[in-house]
Amino acid sequence: MSELFTIFISMALVNNFILVRFLGLCPFFGVSKKLSSALSMSAAVTFVMVAASAATWLVNNYILIPFGVEYMNIVMYILIIASLVQIIELFIRRTNYALYNVFGIYLALITTNCAVLGITLINTNEAFSFIESLVAALGAGVGFTLVLAIMSGIRERLELTDSPRAMKGLPIAFITATMLGLAFSGFGGIV
Amino acid sequence: MNLAVILILGAIGLGSGLIIYLANAKVPHKVQGTEKIEEINRILPGLNCGACGYAGCFSYAQELARNAITATEAPCTVVIQNPEALGCLEKSLNINLDASIINKKALIRCRGRSPVIFNYSGVKSCRAAAQLAGGYKQCPYACLGFGDCTKVCPQDAISIDSEKGVAAADFNKCTGCGLCVAGCPQNLIELVPAGTKIAFRCNYQPLKDIPGREKCQYGCTHCLKCFKACTDEAIIWNKDKAIPEFDIEKCTLCGKCIEECPQCTLELFTEARAEARPATHRC
């Protein structure tokens, strides 16, 4: 149990996907202008990460390893994740419309996100068990949500500040991101 | 060994494709209202170009299902150009989508005949010329003829008539994108419904200062002759701007207003020209 908790904290805070591993930077800057769309994006990312981890763990352990073709895992994972997300999107759209509106367009957009592919490859490299990889994915998603929520909260306020004209928009967001990264480096070493 | 890899990869790819296909065919539509969205989505081109202002074809379809009038306010340019798709959309939304009203065309509201008051030899751009003493023409609202609009037009639909020094839009090439409207520093260009019959080609703004007759040979003098000449009640006199406005549906293209206009400000809009009498080409 404490093992799982360690994995969760490690993924969410210490080895945060965005600020420490530098994965998923495009949504970090692209969708962090508004808190509502940032939350919707991170909900979709978390969901897809967990689903993709489960699917790729099964494929890796029951197909790739028995046939000795682990070296093809990147190609396989891309294929698996893309088709999985397509099917999930179709299901949600037709069965639960409120949920579909929460995820919005982001669910389909993140099929090829590096954070999603990243978590599956990390799970494989660390040789996590099924439960462990699910917890790792959930932790990574929670960390992603946390950083995106903090960032969009800051950026919403930055819009109103009197920053120099040349710094408005992305430049000031980059500077904010570095400070946020420094702050998160304070978690280093707690697990 | 290599063959095994190829087979496994191929099998998984084929399998996932098959699952998506089956899911698409078998998963029932449980949520009410989504059949309609799916139906509209099938009519839309599926390019996800975003020209309508929505995130993609599906979110445009969602908006259409919620509020059918969106089809005229933010029309899909691809559907409009395809009569078959337009018919399907009309049927599924149960509203009348008249392509001649939704489709917009650029109308350049100046005939460029205002006298030149000084020789301008600066930067060859309308925006630069307009900033020097209100332009080199007597009428401060006139077309300056350096073709800022031709430079922004992606369809090459606007050309400059070098003799008259005025821009002219090609009706058939124009897609109504509106880039020229923003590109003209004189605010001369207006998007009008493609079915417009009579074009009022003067940008003169009477409430500012000057009477048109002195400024331009072809400027509106607000004489109301066109309004009085119209027997079909198709002309509505805009009292604030003191200019005529036209009711597309009532106009029968009789050409009386064009004949009556002493200043030749009125003209047949390009598409209607073929149907009208030749006598109206007086100017």
Image (cartoon, rainbow, N blue to C red):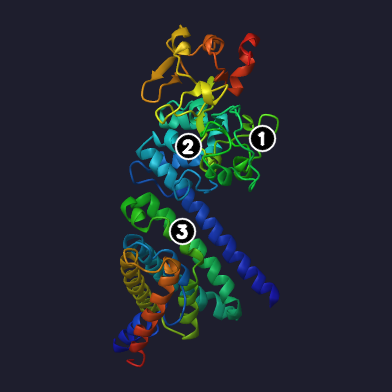
Residue B83 lies, in percent from the top left, at: 56, 29
Q: Callout 3: residue from which chain? A: A
Identify the image quadrant of residue A138.
bottom left
Residue B200 lies, in percent from the top left, at: 52, 23
For label 2, the crowd category at 10 Å Cα-Cα, with few meaning under 14, some 14 to 19 and many 20 or more, is some
Residue hosting label 1: B160
Instruction: Tell me how far mark 2 sits from mark 1, CA to CA.
Output: 29 Å
Number of callouts: 3
For label 1, the crowd category at 10 Å Cα-Cα, with few meaning under 14, some 14 to 19 and many 20 or more, is some
Q: What is the secondary structure assignment of the residue under circle 3? A: helix
Above or below, B100 relative to A116 = above
Residue hosting label 3: A108
Badge 2 vs badge 1, beta-carbon distance below 8 Å: no
Do marks 2 and 3 share a subunit?
Answer: no
- Looking at the image, is mark 2 or mark 1 nearer the viewer? 1
Identify the image quadrant of residue B227.
top left
Residue hosting label 2: B75
Above or below, B20 relative to B127 = below
- Indicate the quadrant containing the N terminus of chain B: top left, top right, bottom left or bottom right: bottom right
- Looking at the image, is mark 2 or mark 3 nearer the viewer? 2
The answer to which of B208 and A174 lies nearer the viewer is B208
Above or below, A13 relative to B193 = below
- Indicate the quadrant containing the C terminus of chain B: top left, top right, bottom left or bottom right: top right
Q: Callout 1: residue from which chain? A: B
